Each structure stands twice: as C-alpha cells, then as structure tokens.
Amino acid sequence: MSIPAIKLKAKLKPEEQQVVFPERKPTENIVPVRELVAGDETLQNPDYFQVHELFTVKDLFDARVHLGHKIGSMDPHMKPFIFGTRFDTVIFDLDKTAFHLRQALNFAAHIAYRKGVILFVTRSAATMNLVERTALEVGEYAHTKDYDTKILTNSTTFFQGLTRLPDLIILLSTLDTVLAQHKIVADAAKMLIPTIGIVDSNCVPNQVTYPVPGNDDTPCAVELYCKLIKEAIMRGKNRRKLNDSQQSKAVETKE
Amino acid sequence: MSLIWNKLLLECSLTRRINCRSISTGLSFSRNQIEGNKSEGTSTEGEQRGSISKAMQSYIERAKAHSEFMNEQHEEFNLGRRHLANMMGKDPETFSQDDVNEAIRYLFPSGLFQTKARPMMRPPEELYPKQKAAEFDASGRPYHAFFYTGRPFFFQMLHEMVNKIMKLNLITGVAAELKEESTSFINGTVWIGKEVLENRLFEKITDVQYSEWMNTLERIITHRHVEREIEYLKQFRVPLARTSLVEQVPPVLLQPDGSKVVTVERVAKKRCRGDITVRMPGTGEIIVNGETLEYFKMVQSREMVISPLQKAGLLGAVDVDARVEGSGETSQAGVVRRGIALGIVALGAESEPLRLAGYLTFDRRNKERNKPGHDSARKKWTWKKR
C-alpha cells in the first residue's frame, strides 16, 4: 500500500510575500496630537477652567444625588460606583461621583471653549422643560422629544442637506423608557460623538464616554446637574470671548 | 479633591474628530491656525476653509444650482409664452397668464377629468417648490435651539406653553372669579386644525404631535388662572363650522281662523315627489292623495308617516294633507315623513331630535346597484345541486 503524497501549496516567492502598503500622502489639516496639545494654552493645565470649585460632595448629598434605585434593578456594570445599600436602595459613592462629574464638566467646558455644538438630551417628562431652558440659556441645543435614529446616522436625508452634527451630547438621563436605553447613546457611539451621561443604578454606563454615576430621577438632582453644566459651559464660552477680543485688539494695535 | 486631567481621552477625542468627521469644523484645527498661534502668521487658504463649514459650502452649492435651474426654466417659459402668442396672433409683449391659459385650452383641448392632469403652462415659481433658507450659520451652527428635533418651531411652541403653565402654577392665592365674558370665546369655537397649525409653523407634524399640542392647550384652558392667558389661547381658536344646519324652513301662513299652515313643496326621494301641508292646531287627521292613512298598504309605511309626530309629541295635534306621486310605497311614505318633519319644525317643534332620528335629512340613495354575477341588486341564480 502506498500512501498518496500530500500536495503542498506552492511557496510564494519572497517578493510576493512582502506586503507593500501604498504611500499615504499627508493631509493638510491633520496635525500630530502632541504638536496640537503643546500649542494650546488651555491644555497645559489639568483643570484650566477651575471646574473643581463649582461644587462639593456636600452639595451632591444635599441634592440627593447619592440615591439610586432598588438593589434588584441594579446593572452589574454600576457596581464599581456604589457605596452600599440601605433599605434595599443603592447608595452611590459620592467621592467617585464627584471625580467623574468634574471630568465631565471639564470636558464640557473645553468643548464649549472650542465652539463645539452641545446637545442636551433627556426623555424624563419631569425635567424636560428644565433641560430645554438650560440649553436655551447657554445658547446650545436640546432634544427632549421622541428621538428618530435618522437624526445622527442619516442626517443628510433627515435635514435635507449636509448638516453639522453635535460635538458633544449631554444626557441628563440615559433611559428612554423605564427599561430601554435611549437610542442616541448607541448612535452617538457609532458616529464618534462623545457623550456625557448621568447614569443611575439601573442604567448601563458602557457606551457613555463620560458616565457620571448619580440619581437621574429627582428634580433637585437634575437641577444641580443643569446648574453645574451651565456654569462649566459658560466658563468655556467666556474664555473664548476674552481670547477673541484680545486677539482682535492685538491685530488693531499692529495695524 | 484631586482632579486628574485625563489628557489621553481629550487627545483621542480631538484626533478622531480631525481624522474621521471632517464635516464638523467647529472643532477642527488646521496646521495654519496652530502655526498662526505660534508665530502670528498671515491668514491663508487653510483659515478661509476653516471659517466656512462643509454644511454651509454644500448649502451654497445647492442654492447656486437651484437658482441656475430656475433661470433656465424661466427662459424656457418666456420662449414658450412668445410662441403661444405668435400662434394665437397676439402681441407677445402683452400676452398675460390668462391669455396663456386660454391658448392652451384652445390648442390642446383635453377631456381629462382631473384638472391637474390637463395640459398647462405656468411660471416655474409656481411649479417648483421653494428652496429652504439655510438654518445654520457659516460655521454650521444651527440658529434654532431645537433644530435637531427636526421640527424646531413646533417644539418651541410646546416649550412656551409649558412655561406658561408653570408660571400659572406659581401664582399663589385664590383664583379670581371667572367672568363669563372672559371665557365665552370657548363656546362655539374649536382648536385650529392640524393643517392650519402646519401652515402657521411651516412644518409638518404627526397626528400624535398634534394631539399632544391640543392636550397641552387643554391643560391651560382648564387651569384655575386661565383668565391670564386668554389672549394667548384666542389665537388658536376658530369658530365651529355649522355642520347640522336644518334646511331652509318653509314659511308659516297664518289663516283667518287663527290656525297656522305650512306647505312643504317638492319633497323628493328616488323618483317620488310630493307636496305636504301641515296645519296646527288640528285633529290628527292624515290625508294622503285624498285617502286616509290606509292609502299605505304596509304597516311599516304607516308607522313611518306618523313617526315624526310621535317623536315631537304632536300626534293628534296637527292635520296633514299630502299629495305624492311616482316611485313605490316606501318612497312615498319617506317623502310624506320628511315633509311632515320639516313642516312641524317650521311650526316650532324642536329640530335636533328629529335631525338625529334622520327625518330631516335628504335620503340621497337611489337605485341599488346590481352585483356581478347576478341579475339584479339582490336576485340570485337558482341553486341547483349538481
């Protein structure tokens, strides 16, 4: 008996083995990140807009930010943010909340400083009007009604023309209904739009860029968030105004 | 509280912004801008590009293409108008749109039922939809805070309404007594329709949104401090269209003996016509074509004739004299019934119960159509089992 010989695949020639990538031409507008950061004054300080002084942990406690939902409805991904439970209710660790909230406020201030478009989103009926008012007061945008997924993912059709999308989405509640997550969270992730989201103990923080663990149902807590976000955005905008006026003055004196 | 500046996250955010989503320019950094900051260099092409967003560039291109297209259409229309004028032997300079319509009717006669389907020649401005003005500035930032909802003006209106409700809720103390004059505008008026609202807002809204809008207004109108917002509410109310106007009531003649007589002429159903005279007060005598109620052979027809008198409680209180001709018994009974109903309304009976019973409404039904596969409206073939 003779065993049939196994046919081996013909070996590639050494020049064929080598993968040749086409040469990429450098695009005009792309700047290396390091160069960009080095050239920007606001990026030299970790807290350029001094958002850490906007609130204390005591303020959060007074606004009832620490109160979550019943332990049974807790999402396992929220476990790192909780302090414990009391009467079956989840209690958030406000030190952690403060850390995340300050990061989020800092990011919002930076986006506002760079003239970004900021969209406020919520589906909670109790705080809809408050959120819309906050957006109007800071000169930004709000969407608190039924959400159509075309808005971000098929915007050219939805708005009948090329449209600039938001640069930051702030969710005062990441839920659409009691059980479902707001679809804009996934859409924003698809479109690479950063999000800031207040995530309660029954929410999933995974797709939110800057999750802030805290109570998203109580009006006084949402009022506090709105107040802080408004202040952070105004700091960014005011700084931009100051810079612009200084620059225009410098140009005038030069001329 | 220590704050760690997570530089990496912002860096990532900035890089992907520049590389991936070039539509957004608010956050884009051009090399020239960065260098300009360092050395205060001169403005170049890069800065100019940065000042106008791609959204705006695209809008400008669209607007340009649209105006070019419209100019072309306008030229074609003018040429066509002059051709028509020549064909009709008139002066092209003074050839108006009315003349164009007349010429088209004459030169291209059409028997098509739909007027829109008939040939026409109208100025291009009337035929092509107007282009939307840009809703954002040069950097691509929308003008309206609710732009991203797709219906900014509608949601702004809702927002204002909720603001008003909250303002009313804040008012402490007892509500002022409502004067009837102040809320009387509600009577006989309804909320404006969906289409009217859409025309006011220049936006299309869904049925659900329209009912949400109405519910919000209802919350204001039922508020105990509503008198402060009456002027606001008035702009959304329109007079109720009269849907149930009783047909022209025939005149009542006063007789020398003090009785009232009404003659309802040419009452019709199918091919039956009739004149019905009602006299009040009377003895309850009903005469049809010179005979008593027994003129109608079927009990149902007799019941039909007296039904309006029963409804109005005038049985035995009026005399009826009817002359009917044409069609069958049921149609004649229907004619007499309608004539009596109209007559007693003229004599002062309440019209609404009679209208609801259907006695005042003209029965526009005619011959019942016959059905496919059959000989007449109801007639069937004889059933034969194989």
Image (cartoon, rainbow, N blue to C red):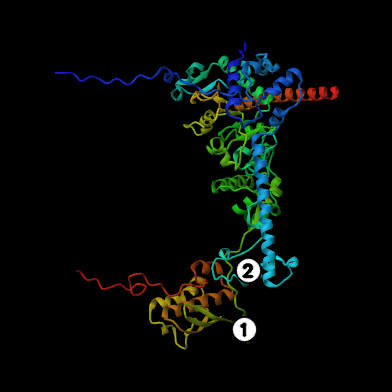
Please give left or right for residue B301 compared with residue A195 in the image.
left
Extreme-top residue of the structure? B2
SS type, badge 2:
helix
The N terminus of chain B lies in which quarter of the figure? top right
Same chain check for tags 1 and 2: yes
Q: For the residues carrying marks 1 and 2, which lies nearer the camera in this image?
A: 2
SS type, badge 1:
loop
Q: Nearer the viewer, residue B345 or A61?
A: A61
Q: Position of residue B182 (x, y in %)?
A: 70, 52
Q: Nearer the viewer, residue A106 or B47?
A: B47
* Amino acid carrying mark 1 in the image: Gly
Quadrant of residue A49 within the rendered picture: top right
Q: Position of residue B301 (x, y in %)?
A: 42, 77
Q: Is residue B236 above or below residue B379?
A: above
Q: Position of residue B71 (x, y in %)?
A: 69, 53
The C terminus of chain B lies in which quarter of the figure? bottom left
According to the picture, the residue beneath numbered tag 1 turns out to be B258
According to the picture, the residue beneath numbered tag 2 turns out to be B104
Q: Nearer the viewer, residue B81 or A236?
A: B81
Q: Nearer the viewer, residue A80 or B313?
A: A80
Q: CA distance from mark 1 to mark 2?
A: 65 Å
Q: On what subunit does the disc labeled 2 rest?
A: B
Label 2 crowd bin: few (<14), some (14–19), many (20+), radius 10 Å: some
